Image: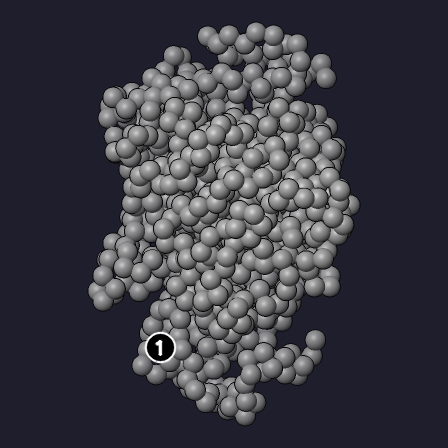
Amino acid sequence: MRSFKTKLALGVCALAGTALVGLGAARADDLTQLIKNPANWATPLGNYAGQRYSTLSQINTRNAKELRPIWTFSTGVLRGHEGGPLVIGNMMYLSTPFPNKVFALDLNHDGRIAWSYVPKQDPNVIPVMCCDTVNRGVAYGDGMIFLHQADTTLVALDAQTGKVVWSVKTGNPAVGETGTSAPFVEGGKVFVGISGGEFGIRGRMMAYDEKTGKPIWTAYSSGPDKDIMFNPEKTMFMGKPVGTDSSLKTWQGQQWMNGGGGTWGWISYDPSTNTVFYGSGNPGTWNPTQRPGDNKWSMTIFARDADTGMAKWVYQMTPHDQWDYDGVNEMILANVPVHGKMTPALVHFDRNGFAYVLNRNTGELLEANKYDPAVNWATHVDLKTGVPQVVSEYAPGDQGADHNTQNVCPAALGSKDEQPASYSQMTHMFYVPTNHVCMDYEPFKVSYTAGQPFVGATLSMYPPKGQDNLGNFIAYDVNTGKIKWSDPEPFSVWSGALTTGGGIAAYGTLDGQLKVVDQRTGKLLYAFKTPSGIIGNVNTYEHDGKQYLAVLSGVGGWAGIGMAAGLTEDTAGLGAVGAYKALSNYTQLGGVLTVFGL
Amino acid sequence: MSFASSLIRGFALLGLLTVSYVGVAHAADATPDAKPYVVKNGDEVDMNTYKGFLYYGDECLRCHGPDGMGSSYAPNLTQALKTMTKVQFETTVMSGIKQVSNSSDLVMPAFGTNPDVVDNLNSIYAYLKARSDGVLKRGHPHHLPGT
């Protein structure tokens, strides 16, 4: 206890030039205060609401063209670098793919390594990580840095020294459970989810005591009410109580035990209702004919009491998934006009191509519109029932096993994957990095073996017919439910977006460009080609009175699947030579942090 | 699970005629130099090869990429099979690979306990060999009627 407080005091002193009144009083407020100071980037998504917005305005639409790289840092790791750096005072913290190194860089000394942490992990975990060995970043709280390692070790590191304060195992890699997501810290707890949807795991959200690593609650995505922490009378779905056995009723036999519903995405938090929000992923096996039912609560948005874990409301976006449209993408909390009415909204750009707007206090579904015109698997979502109107022609389950369902949009990687969008408090618009990819999907029967892939489908991916861009960066207006503007990109945009009070939006591209555009128009203001493709998230911070943008490059992840040779044959007959070209013609592997300034 | 029962399961699954399957498999096993696949017009294949395409997508694609062409983290198998024997291929799939050092973190899991792989190893090999030999184009092949 005493030592923690000392470290906290040190941390506060380090925040030169920032007024943080009353920080010493309550430690639980530590992070809240750090988030309020825009000089920091204190949580993976910038704030509790997951907005990825900064009020910093030194870099703005007028001077963005004068941006330049100021310093760079190689992580020494080759594979896909998702996530992004945290900045707390004069220290920057970042993590790498397996072996999950953590670096603390001293901003007072040109990014000198203050400490590093390299865990010793069994490399057998590598092949049970779905698609590359990514890690989506670290979290800060109470003078500690929290990392969820590939082998599901959740470790707390002293933010000043890098020494291990505590560590705990959250899962079992032998059955395909792995750690890839960034932990989330709030109210003295560390929240962490689990990956392994392609291995028949049983997804769950877990809360640990920030000080000791002691488990506080675990809430599964599927199973009996007790396991999923539902109150049949009080947990709401579409305005009604869910009733008893709401999950069990939607699975055949014991299939829920390999029910998937991984929780590998982002977490956000609303202090006014003390609620955490997150999503669950695909149900076990991609073969829909093998698992009849709605498969609840896979593909679901959960609103849970942060202290008890009890579910307040749920909403399942893709009942009985047939496409691998995981529901884990970020939940952005914003008070915005929806159809002209100011709303406490939760906005979620789902893999399935619909932008969902819900009242985050009640779970009421207000809007679900396509944010990529190519989306064709469903015509619309019924706002009364919450159920998508599936188009049979594009439903592999309707077509049956051993039938190749063609031209389904979006592809399994979704209209957007984990790459988080940004909400601008300036324009009240959402800035969304998207994939523009379709697929053929053929399901077939598979068997479950612990620790082995449990997929049961094969797929081919390509751009929508007649088009040659695999991605777009869009501005989306939830008030009208429409796309305001759309910047086409030759490859999927697999980088988390940033918006700032300077009127800029920033994102990275798979071919390695860091791009800065005008929030109002999408007009390109600045671009710089970093050493490798960008699948990391752009963050911003201020140090010594100067604003910086920081981003990790290092191509890989699911995006790396088309890296070697492109997604399809590069034939003249198909036209669109650029899009079919292999990404390897543009960029190679390698993790590098690039920091930009004026 | 016995080999016989899993084979039967495989037949039931794909609605195959036993005779035709054995015919193809036999041809592949009897003479090592014989092609383990039948490919016509670049994208029409026998059922055994087609099955290989499916199970490749199920078990291998997430790392080795579409059409066996590799990814940013796993090698191109259409190249690898140019020099690899069938026995080497089988050993690698069953036992896995571990090359971990300061500069490499290549780990392939052992699929020896996975019946979907073990029972379909010949099919997966036939598909990848057809890709590697350059006779089968990229993309989703069609299966030849009556095979």
Residue A206, by quadrant, is top right
From the viewer's perspective, tell me whether residue A571 is left or right of residue A45.
left
Return the x and y of residue A178 as percentages of the image width and height: 61, 47
Q: Disc 1 marks which residue?
A: B43
Specify the subunit that label 1 lies on: B
Say which residue appears at 73% left-offset and 39% top-offset: A234
Residue A552, by quadrant, is top left
For residue A178, above or below residue B79: above
From the viewer's perspective, tell me whether residue A536 is left or right of residue B11.
left
Alpha-carbon neighbours of circle 1 within 10 Å: few (<14), some, or many (≥20)? some
Camera-nearest residue between A547 and A347:
A347
Say which residue appears at 73% left-offset and 63% top-offset: A253
Which quarter of the rendering shows the C terminus of chain A?
Answer: top left
Camera-nearest residue between B53 and A366:
A366
Say which residue appears at 68% left-offset and 25% top-offset: A188
- Can I make out residue A303 in this image? yes
Return the x and y of residue A418 as percentages of the image width and height: 48, 43
Q: How is the image coloured?
A: one colour
The three-letter code of the residue at mark 1 reads: Asp
Return the x and y of residue A182 as percentages of the image width and height: 56, 36
Return the x and y of residue B4 as percentages of the image width and height: 66, 83
For residue A307, above or below residue A30: below
For residue A37, above or below residue A201: above
- Can I make out residue A78 in this image? no
- Give the total number of marks visible in the rendering: 1
> Which secondary structure, mark 1?
loop
For residue A161, above or below residue A290: above
Which quarter of the rendering shows the N terminus of chain A?
Answer: top right
Say which residue appears at 71% left-offset and 14% top-offset: A2
Camera-nearest residue between A12 and A427:
A427
